[in-house]
Image (cartoon, rainbow, N blue to C red):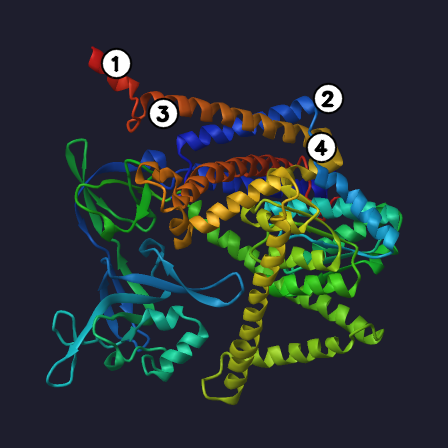
């Protein structure tokens, strides 16, 4: 084995070992973990500075969530929710300080919450609805048209319906100081006060399933809680996948190059339908402008071009492709249900039972069977097929897939086999 | 929380131990038998058909990147298909929706054709990145089937709802099609559209089956022994639940207690 092969084998082994340890090693250090019954808690308090430089103190109770901007798999920045223990002084984060259920207006024209108190926002706090954030770009455009959200994404509280929820957020706040709080546990008949540190992980032990990690505000009186220093394996998983995202983003250029070469050759050799390659290059240039336009303020021509390309052209074409499936499904179903063998006949009968059983028509044609024999009603037969033979088959496949994956992973991990195309020579 | 409890840990060690034990015995020269997989036997036939027609073959290594074990298995099959294609002087086109797969597939094509002494075939064959969206990739793949008069279509790896567009395109173009995936919801779509379908764990056994190396064969046999262990555990579980299960109508345990 030469040095390069040995290095690759070593790195593969170390990488695999990390994921195995991450799966096997408990989230808290075994000997430094304290387990007991929760008696009381003091929630963490975050001292922050808003974008405008105003100080604010946020007790991290159940209504508080933290979001930081991270790159997703496509390489775009995305707001990702973080556990409060993953937030550290110096970080810039968006903090959702509370949620308000919108109520009616009072005589002075002020908007009230559902308890009848006027909605008063502290300096730096801004209201947001989740529908604008989670909906597609088309959804955001719609929200703007009907006046529910403003251009900066902020919710217009006066246009919301009573009963709707707005989230009050402090955006791009700098974390200045954190008091992580403390927990009082009953450990072996003795009361112990445990101060929560930066590396502490709180686990709630459950009777019927594995322990779950919780935030301190989620601790209830009487819960069996384990607290200990973090073993760090779990928190590094994101870093490993981010590394993969970076490589993926870099590789996008290679993909485009390959596509460009194929189309360039088609143009040069004037192959059949060579003019489609011109459309390809025009679309690439159009795509670049649409990409730039995505980050321009709405109303500008660039932004309009981007919205037209993404929502009205690509979106419509995607829907058209999806609708093709129904035709393909029909032709595939025709071939599958042609009764040429006993097995095909069996499949046809089963499929008919399932299809009829899932619709009211199934009950309509089998409802005459007396209730004493209700097991023979088509919906019941259909449910039995799905619950018993079908799920048995799926479980068998799952077992097989799991064993196959373990065997293959072992071969790669221990360098008994090298994946094709990854340096065999 | 996805952390191993002791039961999972025991099973993981047990299955890994069985696989390693069978690999060890295979390396010592023990003769091992694995059942024939018709879909893999048909690969040579599919490439031969393309050679007879003078048409290229099209290969798609699934919709996931190389971090998926299914994709790695698919790349092993691509390597074998390339070897057979080199033997028959058949052009191969590889399509992908993952940019990072382009250099990997190119490397497989180049190294396999070089190894077969036909480096010139690496220039005529090609790897095409179609789109990063699976639906557009499926449609473009289907278009290549028609444009290039493809004779044989190979679909191996992870697939999503677009599996049917990939395979029906080949069916309409009259290609011989071999598909393999461990995504069991897509198997139902491949079965009516493809000539041969390689299902779930068969996909993981492909490289072992094709290479016939003792290490690989040992791991496949180890897999089967693992299934035997699971079967025994299931039977024991069924018996124990029937006899002592709390919700069972014939709760013998309670009956015995009542008798006392």
Left or right of residue A380, residue B59 in this image: right
Instruction: Work out whether B241 lies above or below B174.
Output: above
Instruction: Tell me how far mark 1 sits from mark 2, CA to CA.
Output: 50 Å
Instruction: Work out whether B206 lies above or below A150.
Output: above
Secondary structure, mark 4, is: loop
Left or right of residue B178, residue A385 in this image: left
Instruction: Tell me how far mark 4 sits from mark 1, CA to CA.
Output: 50 Å
Mark 4, other Cα within 10 Å: few <14 / some 14–19 / many ≥20: few
Q: Earlier in the sequence, mark 1 or mark 3?
A: 3
Q: Quadrant of residue B258?
A: top left
Q: Earlier in the sequence, mark 4 or mark 1?
A: 4
Instruction: Tell me how far mark 3 sits from mark 4, CA to CA.
Output: 37 Å
Q: Which residue is mark 3?
A: B241
Residue for point 72% across, 49% down: A421
The residue lying furthest to the front in this view is A368
Instruction: Work out whether A244 lies above or below A132.
Output: above
Q: Quadrant of residue A176?
A: bottom left
- Quarter of the rendering occupied by the C terminus of chain A: top right
Residue for point 81% across, 72% down: A272
Q: Which residue is mark 1?
A: B256
From the top left corner, tell me how far across and down residue B86 is, in percent. Answer: 85, 48
Chain letter of disc 4 in the image? B
Please tell me whether mark 3 or mark 2 is closer to you in this view: 3
Count of all numbered marks drawn on residues in the image: 4
Chain letter of disc 3 in the image? B
Mark 3, other Cα within 10 Å: few <14 / some 14–19 / many ≥20: some
Front position in the image: A279 or A361: A361
């Amino acid at each position: 084995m030469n040095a390069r092969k040995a290095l690759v084998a070593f790195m593969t082994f170390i990488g695999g070992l990390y994921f195995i340890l991450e799966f096997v090693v408990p989230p808290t250090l075994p000997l430094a973990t304290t387990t007991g019954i929760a008696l009381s808690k003091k929630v963490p308090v975050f001292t922050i500075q808003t974008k405008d430089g105003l100080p604010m103190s946020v007790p991290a109770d159940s209504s508080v969530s933290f979001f930081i901007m991270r790159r997703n798999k496509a390489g775009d920045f995305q707001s990702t929710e973080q556990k409060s223990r993953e937030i550290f002084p110096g970080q810039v984060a968006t903090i959702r300080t509370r949620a308000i259920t919108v109520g009616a207006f009072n005589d002075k024209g002020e908007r009230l919450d559902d308890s009848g108190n006027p909605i008063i926002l502290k300096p730096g706090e801004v209201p947001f609805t989740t529908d604008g954030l989670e909906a597609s770009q088309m959804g955001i455009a719609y929200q703007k048209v009907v006046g529910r959200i403003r251009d900066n994404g902020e919710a217009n509280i006066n246009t919301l319906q009573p009963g709707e929820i707005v989230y009050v957020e402090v955006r791009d706040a700098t974390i200045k100081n954190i008091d992580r709080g403390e927990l009082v546990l009953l450990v072996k008949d003795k009361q112990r006060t445990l101060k929560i540190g930066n590396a502490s992980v709180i686990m709630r032990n459950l009777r019927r399933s594995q322990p779950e990690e919780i935030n301190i505000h989620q601790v209830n009186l009487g819960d069996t809680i384990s607290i200990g220093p973090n073993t760090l394996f779990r928190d590094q998983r994101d870093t490993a996948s981010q590394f993969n995202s970076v490589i993926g983003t870099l590789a996008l250029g290679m993909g485009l190059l390959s596509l460009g070469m194929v189309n360039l050759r088609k143009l040069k050799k004037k192959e059949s339908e060579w003019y489609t390659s011109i459309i390809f290059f025009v679309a690439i240039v159009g795509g670049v402008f649409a990409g730039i336009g995505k980050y321009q303020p709405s109303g500008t021509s660039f932004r309009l071009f981007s919205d037209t390309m993404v929502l009205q052209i690509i979106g419509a074409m995607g829907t058209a492709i999806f609708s093709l499936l129904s035709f393909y499904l029909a032709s595939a179903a025709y071939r599958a249900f042609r009764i040429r063998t006993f097995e095909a006949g069996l499949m046809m009968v089963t499929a008919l039972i399932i299809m009829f059983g899932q619709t009211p028509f199934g009950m309509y044609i089998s409802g005459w069977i007396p209730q004493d024999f209700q097991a023979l009603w088509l919906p019941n037969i259909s449910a039995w097929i799905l619950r018993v033979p079908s799920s048995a088959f799926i479980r068998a496949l799952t077992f097989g897939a799991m064993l196959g994956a373990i065997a293959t992973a072992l071969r790669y991990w221990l360098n008994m086999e090298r994946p094709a195309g990854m340096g065999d020579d | 929380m996805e952390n191993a409890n002791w039961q999972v840990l025991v099973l993981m060690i047990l299955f890994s131990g069985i696989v390693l034990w069978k690999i060890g015995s295979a390396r010592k020269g023990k003769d091992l038998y694995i059942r024939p997989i018709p879909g893999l036997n048909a690969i040579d036939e599919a490439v031969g058909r393309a050679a007879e027609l003078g048409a290229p073959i099209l290969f798609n290594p699934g919709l996931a990147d190389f971090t998926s074990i299914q994709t790695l298995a698919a790349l092993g099959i691509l390597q074998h298909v390339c070897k057979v294609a080199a033997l028959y002087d058949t052009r191969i086109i590889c399509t992908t929706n993952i940019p990072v797969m382009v250099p990997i597939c190119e490397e497989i094509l180049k190294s396999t054709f070089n190894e077969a002494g036909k480096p010139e075939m690496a220039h005529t064959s090609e790897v095409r990145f179609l789109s990063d969206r699976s639906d557009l990739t499926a449609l473009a793949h289907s278009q290549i089937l028609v444009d290039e008069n493809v004779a044989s279509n190979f679909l191996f790896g992870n697939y999503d709802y677009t599996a049917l567009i990939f395979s029906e395109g080949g069916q309409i173009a009259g290609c011989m099609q071999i598909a393999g995936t461990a995504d069991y919801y897509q198997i139902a779509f491949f079965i009516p559209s493809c000539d041969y379908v390689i299902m779930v764990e068969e996909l993981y056994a492909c490289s072992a089956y094709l290479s016939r190396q003792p290490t690989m064969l040992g791991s496949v046999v180890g897999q089967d022994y693992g299934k035997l262990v699971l079967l025994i555990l299931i039977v024991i579980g069924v018996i124990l639940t029937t006899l002592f299960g709390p919700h069972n109508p014939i709760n013998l345990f309670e009956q015995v207690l009542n008798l006392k």
